[in-house]
Amino acid sequence: TRTSIEKGRLHRPEREGVHVRIGVIGAGHIGGTAATLFARAGHEVAVSNSRGPDSLAPLVTSIGRGAHADSPEGAAKFGDPILLAIPWRRMDG
């Protein structure tokens, strides 16, 4: 894989134009930041949390184009891949 650094950014020519639908489960510091970076890179992002899509309106507005709020189940179905960004203590089992 050919990789170069241009103006401080990692650049992989063979990946240009590739758009991915990404589901983000957990919209805290890590999930919210990742969703923002994914959308800025041109990917579609479904963001979710345990409080429901309505609680994500400020985050989705700040991310802008390419982002929408969904339920955790909806984000999991939407994304390929899926980022699970929830606290360990919230995991079942």
Image (cartoon, rainbow, N blue to C red):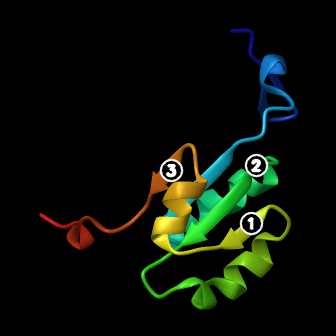
Q: Which residue is mark 1?
A: 67
Q: Which residue is mark 3?
A: 82
Q: Which residue is mark 2?
A: 43
Q: Residues within 10 Å of mark 3 (few under 14, many from 20)?
A: some
Above or below 13: residue 61: below
Q: Nearer the viewer, residue 11 or 83?
A: 83
Instruction: Please indicate whether residue 52 sits to the left or right of residue 40 in the image.
Output: left
Label 3 or label 2, whichever comes before in sequence order: 2
Q: How many marks?
A: 3
- Marks 3/1: CA distance? 14 Å
Which quadrant: the C terminus? bottom left
Image spot of residue 49 (x, y percent): 48, 77
Label 3 or label 1, whichever comes before in sequence order: 1
Which residue corresponds to the image point at 52% horizontal and 86% vertical from the top-left?
A: 52
Instruction: Please indicate whether residue 81 sits to the left or right of residue 61 in the image.
Output: left
Above or below 27: residue 5: above
